[in-house]
Amino acid sequence: MSETLIRTLEPTTPDEVLEAVAEAAAGKRRIEVVGGGTKRGVGKVERPDLVLSLAALDAVLDYAPEELVLTARPGVKLKDLEKLVASEGQMLAFEPPRLAKLLGAKGEPTLGGALAANLSGPRRVRAGAARDHLLGFAAVSGRGEAFKAGGKVVKNVTGYDIAKLMTGSWGTLAVMTEVTIKVLPKPKTEATVLIFGLEDRRAVEAMARALNAPVEVSGAAHLPVAIAARAPLKAEMAVTALRLEGFDASVAARIETLGQALKDFGRCDVLHAKLSRDFWAQVREVEVFQKDPRPLWRVSVPPASGWRIGEALSGEVVYDWGGGLVWALSEDAAAVRTAARAAGGHASLWRGEAPLAAFEPLDGALAALTARVKAAFDPHGILNPGRLGA
């Protein structure tokens, strides 16, 4: 079916979502579920019969700053949500990236999209992933049935943690209509300790030492020399960065402690406050690769093995999460997948075309388990079919 003929539904209530999905399920019609549409090109949906846009489900339903809990519809824009919680001195601690410019997309990223893709920024090394901040949700399964899971309190564990199952499912299991997340107090200030000139393997060692030191590092990234030389940083050497957040006196004391812990790696410099925030925004949005047209890969590996990706791909990489997240430029899909597997991880294609599926196919017991979960929530495969390659 031509894309121009595909009908787009824009429900404004959960009941309208239920009606739309139930009708599609009855007719086994395929649905492409979208929020802001900024990640629509990642793992493209196969031949949808209709598009279900959640953009109009954009209300904040409840916000209790004193309880550190917020409930909203999935279409709420991240920028609006972050402005709201900042007015109460709070933040979305998983620091969700936008990535719209990186992906060449229009529209505004939404809370539902960030959770569906389990997107977390540099603070993941300290605060955990997006899935760790989703307390509960309401949704409509591919069977056309409404259900709820989790709750509106931080401690609410009964049976399977379905909330964590939804994050990272890319809308292939259910359509979320309401989400409850936890928020955290925003740090009073921040600073970033910089080390220059380290090779990738040595940088990963430095980041590991920093993350294991008693200083509460909340960001650990490395830009190899060829990448650091690009805009916007335009540095003359490789840059290894370690973020510290909190009260002024605490941050100052921890800078000293961290400097001592890393003295074997060379002299440290410090970025304070706004310069630090600007730097981590650049890391979070992978700004250094925004104007490069080559295929872009997101590689997840054990942090200690992250350097192997840069070694295999000639350093065309950016390391985040202490080496556990590697953004890589490469037109050789097979080489990327081989390097990821050799390092004990996996790779997904986020921008560009490749002869392989965007998401690496599962195999063995994990593939069988995933198929059973999919069958339980969406037996006819109507929700975002093909998005994850199966």
Image (cartoon, grey):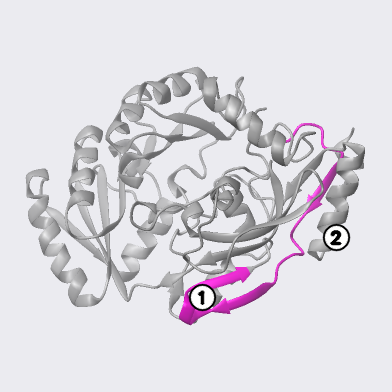
Q: Is residue 150 among what the camera can see?
A: yes
Q: Residue at x 23, y 50 (%)?
A: 211
Q: Quadrant of the C terminus?
A: top right
Hey, which residue is sitting farthest front in the picture? 159
Assign a secondary structure to mark 1.
Answer: helix
Position of residue 92 measured from the top left corner of the image (x, y, whole percent): 48, 65
Q: What x and y, as percent, mark residue 330?
A: 47, 27
373 w.r.t. 182: above or below: above
Q: Could you tell whether 191 is left or right of 149 in the image?
A: left
Q: Could you say which disc has been placed on residue 16 in the image?
A: 2
Q: In this view, does 26 lie to the left or right of 362?
A: right
Front-lying residue, 196 or 4: 4
Relative to 113, 364 lies left or right = left
Which residue is under mark 1? Answer: 85
Q: Give the range drawn in magenta.
A: 44-71
Q: Residue 202: percent from the left, percent from the top?
A: 19, 36
Instruction: Give residue 98's position: percent from left, percent from top.
Output: 55, 55
Callout 2: SS: helix
**Residue drawn at (11%, 56%) of the image:** 259
In magenta stretch: residue 51: yes
Q: Is residue 150 above or below residue 356?
A: below
